[in-house]
Amino acid sequence: MTEMTQRDDREKRRESFRQDALEAWAEFQATGLHLTAEEVQEWLASWGTEDELPMPVCHK
């Protein structure tokens, strides 16, 4: 992969991430639904363990 192709790929991924963030922010503003960082961290920490937790439910 050429340097220019890599740079273009990075820019496309960065723009996609930015668009996802803007959409998530708009949805939060409209609904107020969210998860806390602690809820997500606890859920992710349980992945692959015997006590794997279900995905947390968004709340206001």
Image (tube, rainbow, N blue to C red):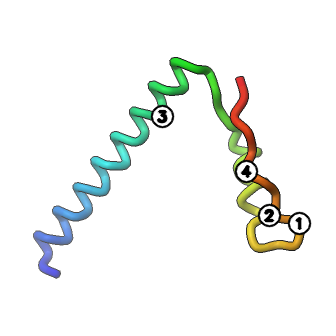
Q: Position of residue 18 (x, y in %)?
A: 35, 42
State the residue position of label 1.
51
Work out whether mark 4 precedes mark 3 in sequence or the reverse, and give the earlier one.
3
Q: Are marks 2 and 1 in contact (CB under 8 Å)?
A: yes
For the residue marked with disc 4, what is the amino acid? Met
Name the image quarter holding the N terminus.
bottom left
Find residue 59 and report its image quarter.
Answer: top right
Which element carries disc 3, helix, strand or loop? helix
For the residue marked with disc 1, what is the amino acid? Asp
State the residue position of label 2.
46
Which element carries disc 1, helix, strand or loop? loop
Measured in 3D between alpha carbons, the distance from the residue under mark 1 to the one under mark 4, in whole angstroms, is: 13 Å
Q: Work out whether 23 lies above or below 5.
A: above
Mark 4 nearby-residue class (10 Å; few <14, some 14–19, many ≥20): few
State the residue position of label 4.
55
Residue at (40, 42) in percent of width and height = 20
Q: Work out whether 10 lies above or below 18.
A: below
Q: Work out whether 24 lies above or below 9.
A: above
Measured in 3D between alpha carbons, the distance from the residue under mark 1 to the one under mark 3, in whole angstroms, is: 29 Å
